[in-house]
Image: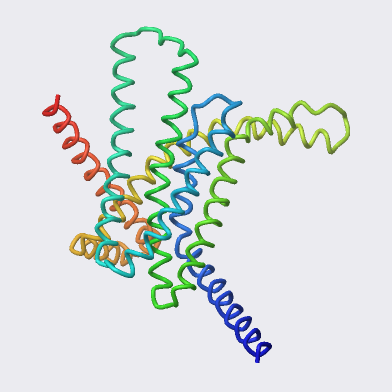
Amino acid sequence: MAGASLLTLLDDIASILDDVALMSKVAAKKTAGVLGDDLALNAQQVTGVSADRELPVVWAVALGSFRNKLILVPAAMLISAFIPWAVTPLLMFGGLFLCFEGFEKLHHSYSHRKDKHSEQAEPDVADISDLAAYEKEKVQGAIRTDFVLSAEIIAITLGIVADKSLSTQFFTLAVIGIVMTVGVYGLVAAIVKMDDAGLYLSQRQGESSFTRFNRKVGFGLLSAAPLLMKSLTIIGTAAMFMVGGGILTHGLHWVSEQIHHAEQWVSAIAVVGPVLGLLTPSVLNAFFGIAAGAVAVLLMTGIQKLRS
C-alpha cells in the first residue's frame, strides 16, 4: 500500500514537472519580446558607472530583480485567485510609469544639453559621496524599471497557465522568473564588460595566427563597445515607450482596435506591406507611449509646483 502511494505521488510529481516544462517553454516564447526590451533597458540603466563598479551594480540590480519576483509571483497568484479584474489596471499603471520615466529621460537630456549650451561652464568633478549617490540612484531606477517589465512577464505567463492547477501555475511562474532574471542579467554583465574583454584580447603578446586573431577580435570589441552602449541607450528609451504604450493600448480596447485596423491597412500595401505591417503596431504603440509620458510628466510637474 505504501509502495503504491509512493508511486502515485511520484507519478503526480512527474506529471506536474511535465506540465511545468511545457508551459515554461510556451511562456518563454510569448515573453521573448519583453525579454529583449528588458535586456536593452537594463543594459542602458547600468551605463555611466565606473568600470570597476559595473559588475557590482549589475549584481545589485539582479538581486533587486529576484526580490521583485519574490513579490510578484505570490501577488500574481493571489490577484488571479481573488481579484482577477485588477490585473489589467495594475499593468496599465505600470505601462504609464514606463512612459513617464522614458519621457522624463528625454526631457532631462534636452534640458541638460540646453543648459550646457547656454552656460558653457565646466562641470564640477563629482566627489566620492556623489558617485555613491549616483550609483544608488542608477540601481534603484533599474530595479523600478525591472519591476514593471517583470510584472508584464509574470502577467503574460499567468495568462498562459490560468487553466492549470495551482501547483503548476506556481512552479511555472517560478521557473520563468528565475530563467528570465539569470538570462537577462548574465547578458547585461557580458555587454557592460565587453570593452574589458576587448582590451585584454588586444594586449595579447605573440605572433602566432591564433594570437593575431585574438588581437583583431579584441580591437573589434573595443570599437564596437561604445557603439553598442550608445545603441542600447537609444533602444532602451524607445523600448520604454513601446512596452509602456503597448500595455496602455492593450488595456484601451478602442485604441487597440484602431492600431489593429492600421496594421491591416498597411499590410495590404503591395510588396513592402507585410514588413511595414509588422512594424506598424510597435511604432504606433511608441507614439502613444510618448504622448502618455508627456501628459504624465506635465501632470507630475504641475502637482509638484502646486505642492511647493
Color style of the picture: rainbow
Quadrant occupied by the N terminus? bottom right
- The residue that appears at 27% across and 66% down in the rendered structure is 83
Closest to the observer: 66 or 154? 66
- In the picture, measured across the screen, residue 254 lies left or right of residue 57, that is left
- The residue that appears at 47% across and 43% down in the rendered structure is 64
Above or below, 48 against 174 in this view is above
Q: Position of residue 76 (x, y in %)?
A: 37, 62
- In the picture, measured across the screen, residue 165 lies left or right of residue 189, that is left
Closest to the observer: 278 or 119? 119
Residue with the most extreme bottom position = 1
- The residue that appears at 47% across and 48% down in the rendered structure is 67
Residue with the most extreme top position = 121
Q: Position of residue 71 (x, y in %)?
A: 41, 53
Closest to the observer: 252 or 94? 94
Residue with the most extreme left position = 306
- In the picture, measured across the screen, residue 183 lies left or right of residue 84, that is right
Above or below, 8 against 47 in this view is below
Q: Position of residue 250 (x, y in %)?
A: 27, 61
Closest to the observer: 242 or 181? 181
- The residue that appears at 47% across and 64% down in the rendered structure is 173
Above or below, 222 against 169 in this view is above
Quadrant occupied by the C terminus? top left
Q: Position of residue 82 (x, y in %)?
A: 29, 68
